[in-house]
Every structure is written in structure tokens, then in C-alpha cells.
Image (tube, coloured by chain):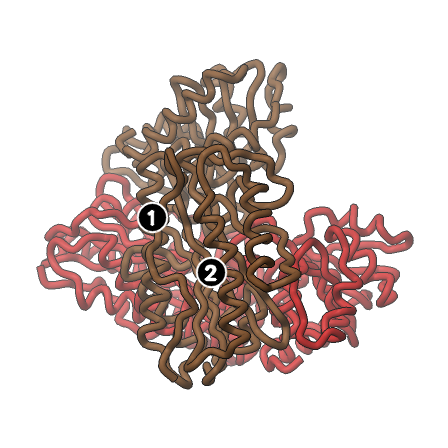
Chain colours: A red, B brown
Amino acid sequence: MSDPLATATLSRLREHMDRTPFDWLVLGSRENVGYVTGYRSVAGDIFPTHQMVAIVSQTDVILVAPAADVGAAGEHLALDYIEPFGTFFFETAHQDQLNPTIARRHENLAGAFSSAIRRFGVAGRVGVDGGLDEPAALAAQVPGLRFESVGQWMQTVRSVKLKAEVDRLAEAARLADEGIQAALATASSGVSERDLAAVVGTTMAAGGGTPRFIVVTSGERSALSDAHPTSRLWQKGELLRFDVGCTYDGYWSDLGRTAVLGEPSDLQVRRYEAIKAGEDAQLRIAAPGVLASTLFATAVESVEDAGLRPYRRHHCGHGIGREVYEPPIVSPGTELPLQSGMVLCFETPFYEIGWGGMMVEDTVVITADGNQRLNHSDRSLRVVDG
Amino acid sequence: MSDPLATATLSRLREHMDRTPFDWLVLGSRENVGYVTGYRSVAGDIFPTHQMVAIVSQTDVILVAPAADVGAAGEHLALDYIEPFGTFFFETAHQDQLNPTIARRHENLAGAFSSAIRRFGVAGRVGVDGGLDEPAALAAQVPGLRFESVGQWMQTVRSVKLKAEVDRLAEAARLADEGIQAALATASSGVSERDLAAVVGTTMAAGGGTPRFIVVTSGERSALSDAHPTSRLWQKGELLRFDVGCTYDGYWSDLGRTAVLGEPSDLQVRRYEAIKAGEDAQLRIAAPGVLASTLFATAVESVEDAGLRPYRRHHCGHGIGREVYEPPIVSPGTELPLQSGMVLCFETPFYEIGWGGMMVEDTVVITADGNQRLNHSDRSLRVVDG
């Protein structure tokens, strides 16, 4: 494997595996497969039923994948370690090159999986994540195999990011941040939500990001939480709320900003200062050892102390990585201490139907003695000349 | 409902419902929910576990949705027809406005579903698509309810597009086509796959599209079927293969083109002429009444007659709409006659590991007496000055 990121994440996983009773892991979630093999399937992102399985030990990584994926996955794993299923035709200039793969082709995932675990001698207690449609049915293919859940454990392993992962998350955050700044720079009276969303998406794509969600909502629509942009025009005195994210090399961003066209009202200013006080408090205290639930409580208290009361939220942030929401979720129930290397989004949105919505959301990496923001734009209520 | 597209698709569905034994449909696939309600959830596109259910009769449409979706879904359905579940907080400027919704909030989808079908008197034989995780468990919530599968029937209804749908598919195709043309216009020796992909994505986003997959592969990588672009530089004499798609207002595109940097080799020209002959034949014969399987056989024969033999493919095209692959699939087993209003992608790709890959893929709408292309760029092997 020549992919430095995948080499690093796989060896991180293997260090953790050493402290479990499992010699083998069977991983079916898209993100876990990418973590151990480095291979991200294009088809996996567009077909909800697309399924691959990675089988991992201290020495081997085997990928069970649709035959159509063999070409691209072959850049990450030796063909002998790919077990294909289904129908797809690659011809070969050098006839011996793909023959082993074609000879091993199976009708479906269960057949290919069964073949792979026999071929590599997978046995005994096997850790399996929650990403398989039918883990029990797969296990039944091989007598003596015992599957035990490691879905949460995998999330814990992945929650502490390597430097190469933080770099990608920072780049994804930078592109989202730049997208918002570019939109604000072109915004003026009568611009539509769609027009601004196009600027955000264009900025992300130009920088090599893949736009994933672009919520640009104005006026009363800003209260709608997640909503697609429309042709609605931004009017003087109205709020405009951005909540946008892209992926860069498979790693997500998720950022929020709020603006007003022309002079903001007293209520807009007061409410924004309150939600910003909540995020300020999170940025101030986030450090190794602090519980996610404490971060949540502190955020809510700070918003309320600043005058927006009651402030009702189910979470005030979340981990981010190969998934847009990863543990830890910054919520009342999460008694999990932060660790150096975790990357989190902090957010304190407020939605009032009939009035509007506002948010400020930023991404930080937890460091040895605190945290560091991965995006750097102005966090205040932005005022655009009307 | 003020959304003209949703009004049209819903009334199309109701015409078809009249000819079934079902008074009620229960639809869980993301695309079916969008078809009947007009509401597309932002969260639904980014969280694989996101689930909504639409319940439809000749007079009512009810949406069972996460509480976080209520704000945005409320632009498409009256709040009284939305049954929310889970935790999310919207405040309200006018206290009576959202209260009914909050009062009806349920812990999970099963609870909200059960409440909705009691409230609206859903009973008897109910058609259900395949998009529900646990239809049996849901049905068990209400004694006397009998679920029968209408998944394929829904696909058949959706396969014939309304004018408003064709317009969106044409716009999505136009943006993908323009993206490829823009990339080719900037391409020259030493440009990277990533650079060209950024041009494609930027063009899509600038026009209001959401980039969904951008395969730009050069040299031997062009043989890899679906693969992410890399920093590999395009070299003189090499193939470059585009396979790209975006969504516009929820409707997909999927187009392919092939180029060579500098003078193409005889083999490149001959093979491209052969695959193009296959697509030419499809464009020539596609018309109402022609079987999808005939389209497939004709494509393969034409490629082989033009000198690329054997030409091995599992399909040579597919329907496209709210999903990138929809019935009919242009494959040997599909004994389905084309109908006026169907929109299909035709494609005849060829992949040879160690040599390269090429494709030409276009989108057509079937008309009363033939078909019409929705994208219009030059279909020949494109030569870029090296």
C-alpha cells in the first residue's frame, strides 16, 4: 500500500487491536473500509445499496467489493487481496494481470465474503462493525465464526485524528469558510439564496472540495434549520444564515455564519451576542479531560446567561471526520472526556419560526493544553451593506 | 401545496393509483417521498440513516419526519399533515403556529407512523415501497393493516417523466456537459486530473447544480471505471475519460466523454469509433415500443461489427431521474418497451487495464416518434492540442 494516509490509519487501528481479544475485524461501514484500505468508492457515494467489506488482521487487509470496484481498489490493495462479486468486465492488456481476480469472482457479497475468510483463515472471535446488512447471515457462511460488535470501539479509535487527517479536515474547513466569505463579499440587496449558494459551491469545488450541503436561508426561511436554498431575495434588515459543508479527500467540514443586510436590529444583535457567548464558552474551555456533556451544559448556560432564555437544544456540537457527525456528540448524555487529537464542531444555533434563525459554528482540534480553530473567519454577526 | 412540480407528480401518481386496489400508499424511499410531497431533506442527503415516510391517498398526503425537518417540510405540507418524531427545538414567534406539531411529537418513527395512520384512518390493503427499514414492524403497530409491495410499480410510475421533470433533467445534463466542455477548453499538457475535475465541479456549481460524481481519469487510470481524480498529470498521447454527474433540483445527470492529448493513435481512433457506433445505433433506434433488451443487443452488436470484439458489457445504459440509475436498465434481461417520456442514459464504455478506458454517454428523452438528446456537445473522440 503506497497511500501514506491509509498506512497511518491502518497502523493506528492495529495498535488498538493489540489491546482487544480480536485477531480479525470485519468492517462494513463505508468510512471504516476507507480507514483501513484507503479506498473510497465513487459508486459507494452515489448508490445507497453499494456494499464493501474489509477484513483486517495484524498482517492482512482483504477487501470484498463489487467487481466494478476492482480497477480503482487495485490502486490501494494487491489484486490477490481483493475478493470481487457481481458482474463487470475489465479487459486486460497483460492477460495474466487480472486473471486471478476474474477466476475468483462470486455472484454476491456473501459468496465472496465466505471465500475470503476461508482463503485467509479467518477464525474464532471476530470483531464486526454495524455497517453490514446481514452480519449474522455472513457469519453463518463459516461454522465456528463468532461475530462480536466493535462498532462503537471503531468510532472511538477513529475519534482521535492523526495529523494527516487533521490536515484534510482543516482544508475542508478552509474551503467551507472561504465559500461563505466569498458569498458575503458578493452579497447585496436583492441577491437570491440560490445565487449565494452557487458562490459557496463554486468556491469549494474550485479548491478541490466536493460540496455536500449548502444551506443558505434568508429572512423567515433562516429559521428552517436545514433547508435547500431557493430563489428568495435577501431583503434589507433580514437575517441570512449559512450552514455549509464539503468533503476534501473524504474528510468533512460543517460551518455556520449569520449576516444581516444593512443595520441589524437590537433584537438581532442581542440574540446573536447570546448564541456567540455560548460558542465562546466552548472555545474557552475545550481541552483534554473536559466531558462532552460539560461542554454542552456550559454552552447552554452561557447562552441563557447572555439573555436568550430558555435556550433549548439537543446538542451543541459533534465530532467530525470521515462522517459529518461522529462521536463525541456534544450533548447532555455524553459523559466522554475530550482527548488531544479529537476534531469537533461547536455550534449554538437558534431557530424561531416566523422570525428567523442564526448560528455560529466552527471546527477545532483538541490540543495538549486546549484547542485550536481549524477555520479562521470573523465569528461576529456580519453586516453587509444594504 | 404551492410547488407546481410536486402538484404535477402527485397527480400523476394518483391517476395510476386509481387503477390499483390500494386506497393508501406508504412510501419510505427518499425519492418516492420527494415525488409525492415535493420535500427533499438536506439531512436525508448527508445522513444514511435518515428516514421519512409519506402516506398518500387520493385526498391526503401525510409526512412522517424527524422533528428537525418540520420547519423546511412545512413549506410543502400544512403542519397538520406532518407527524414529527425525535428531538429538535424550533421556537415560534406566534405561539399557536407550531404547537400542534410539538404536541404530536413522538419518540421514534414507529410511534409517529402509528399515530399518523390512526389519525387519518389508514386501513385495509396498503401499498408499500421497499424504502422502509422495517415495514413489517410498522404494520404491526396497527392491527388489520396489510402491507403489499409496490416498489417496482412506483419505479414504473416514475419512469415516465413529466415535462417539468424533463426540464430539470435537461438542465442537469446541460451543466454536466458544460463542465466537461469547460475542462477540455482549459486542458493542456501537464494538467492534472484534479485540476480538470475542479473545473467540472465549479461549472456545475456556478449553474446551480450539486456536483455528485466527477470521474476524470488519464492514461492507464482511464481504465479504472469509477475512480476519484488524482494529481496525475495528463501526458501527450494519453486518453482522458470523463464520467460526471450532478443534480439540479433533485434530478440527476450522468454523461461521458473521451479525449486524447495530441494526435490519437490508430488503435485509439479505431476503438473509439467502435464504441461510438454502439451509442449511434442506440440513438438511431430508441423509440416507443423498442425493448430495453433490444437496445442493449443492438449496442453490443454495433460495437463488435465496428471491430471491437468481443465487447463484453452487463448494461449499455439506464433510466435516470431522482436516482442516477432507474428502470429501465438497458441490459439483456430487460424485456420492457420504451415509452414516450422516459429519460435514459446510453453508454458504451470500454475498459482495458494497462491500456486505458473510453466512453461516450448521453441522455435522451423518448418522444412520440423517436428520441431527443438532452445534452448537445460533440460526441467524437476529442483532440486537445498537446
Image coordinates of residue A339 in percent, x first then y, are 56, 72
Q: Can you give x and y, in whole percent of width and height, for residue B118 in the image?
A: 50, 18
Secondary element at image label 2: loop
* Residue A243 showing in the rendered view: no
Q: As shown in the figure, which amino acid type bears the numbered disc 1? A: Ala
Q: Is residue A56 left or right of residue A268?
A: right
- Residue drawn at point x = 43 percent, y = 72 percent: B259
The earlier-in-sequence mark between 1 and 2 is 1
Write down the chain letter for disc 2.
B
In the rendered structure, the residue with mark 1 lies on which chain? B
Q: Quadrant of residue A289?
A: bottom right
Between the residue at mark 1 and the residue at mark 2, the CA separation in whole angstroms equals: 17 Å
Residue situated in front as seen by the camera: B28 or A326 = B28
SS label for mark 1? helix
Which of the image's four quarters has the C terminus of chain B? bottom left
Nearer to us in this view, B228 or B368: B368
Q: Are marks 1 and 2 on the same chain?
A: yes
Q: Is residue B251 above or below residue A344?
A: above
The numbered dot on residue B170 is 1
**Quadrant assignment, res B71:** top left
The residue under the point 42% across, 54% down is B362
* Dots 1, 2 in contact, CB < 8 A: no
- In what quadrant of the picture does the N terminus of chain B appear? top left
Q: Amino acid at mark 2?
A: Val
Q: Position of residue B252 (x, y in %)?
A: 41, 49
- Mark 1 packing: few (<14 Cα in 10 Å), some, or many (20+)? many
Task: Name the residue carrying label 2.
Answer: B360
Answer few, some or many: residues within 10 Å of disc 2's Cα (few below 14, many 20 plus, some between 14 and 19). Answer: many
The residue drawn where x is 79% and y is 66% is A24
**Can residue A214 be spotted in the picture?**
yes
